[in-house]
Amino acid sequence: MSTPFFIVGASRSGTTLLRLMLNAHSRLFLPRELKYFQTLHAPVDVESWTSPVPDDTYRRLVRQYLEARRDLFATDLDRLEAQIAEDPERTLRGPYRVVLEHLCRQHGKARWGEKTPHNLFYVDVLNDMFPGAKFIHVVRDPRAVTRSMNAIAYYSGETVFNALNWRRSIREGATAFQDVLSPDQQLNVSYEDLVSAPEATLRTICRFLHEAYEPAMLRFYETAADHMPSTIRTPAIRNPVNQKSLSKWKTQLTRTEIEIVEVLCSAEMERLGYERLTDPALTIYGRIVLKAAYWHWKRWQHRAHRGYEISYPFLSGLHARLRRWRPRLRSLF
């Protein structure tokens, strides 16, 4: 098995597009997001993954993970559980490795990779689990990311939250790459380059992975549906690469939303070469401060949860409680 590789990045940054492109390579296979670490919640200590897990706990963790991802493993769940049980490794790496090796063989490929954007917050653990692994960090304009997140019900629709989520991913990703990985293990790829110059960008990625470039990767859309869930949140992957997505945010975000993103992400945008369009007035900070404070408070509450992402509307818990209490209050008057 060749050295594995991982695609990471902020949500809605184009990691799915890159996964499908690499899946079109004759040697490479990347399944749909395994979300392994997100599924293994506390009390599992992933930082101590080398410690053998007692058999009963191990079996329970394996079943818990496979059941949680039944959408991926429905037809292979029992077989995978048996393979993991037969594998001599009894650490937290075992199920992850066995699943990926199984899926890779099943698709007749020689080398596996994994694309779970959230793995950005587990670079240290993955690097420890798979020494010498390669990491590709996909970066996209925060205004485009925020527009995309705002448009999908899975996320909060809160521009402040989504911009802050992007900023945190960029900051922690840069720190992890700098502190944990050697230069030959890391590659930053911009979404804008991937769609504007796909062949040149894919050639760079192939050199980084020590794989030969294959033109079939540009025809990823021919087989994309085979590697996606039935509900596709990114319909554009059914077509050849185009640059339409690069400027959608300019018309689909309001000027106020653009100002909010540019205020919150200014330092990271400058470092990454994204030019600002606005010169926000002081009044914009009034629109930001309360939601930003709430975002930091929720982050602090969940500080033990790596990469915790706020994906619900502002004060949604309070709104839900008010809705439950409203009938009772009306009955009093």
Image (tube, rainbow, N blue to C red):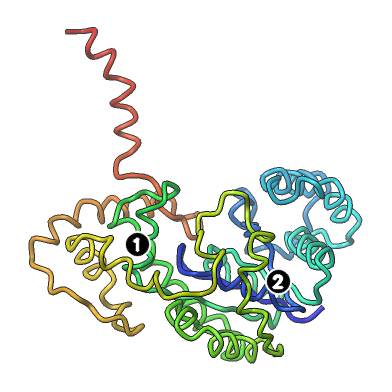
Front residue of 277/316: it is: 277
**Which residue shows up at 32% across the image and 56% down it?**
161
- Give the numbered dot on residue 129: 2
Front residue of 193/226: it is: 226
Quarter holding the N terminus? bottom right
**Amino acid on which disc 1 is placed:** Thr
For disc 1, the marked residue is 146
- Considering only order in the chain, which callout, 2 or 1, is on the residue closer to the N terminus? 2
Disc 1 element = helix
Count of marks overlaid on the render: 2
Q: Is residue 204 left or right of residue 4?
A: left
**Which residue shows up at 53% across the image and 62% down it?**
118
Residue 104 appears at what percent x and percent y?
79, 67
Vertical order, 328 against 270 (above or below): above
- Give the numbered dot on residue 21: none
Res. 319 image quadrant:
top left
**Which residue shows up at 14% across the image and 61% down it?**
285
**Which residue shows up at 67% across the image and 80% down it?**
216
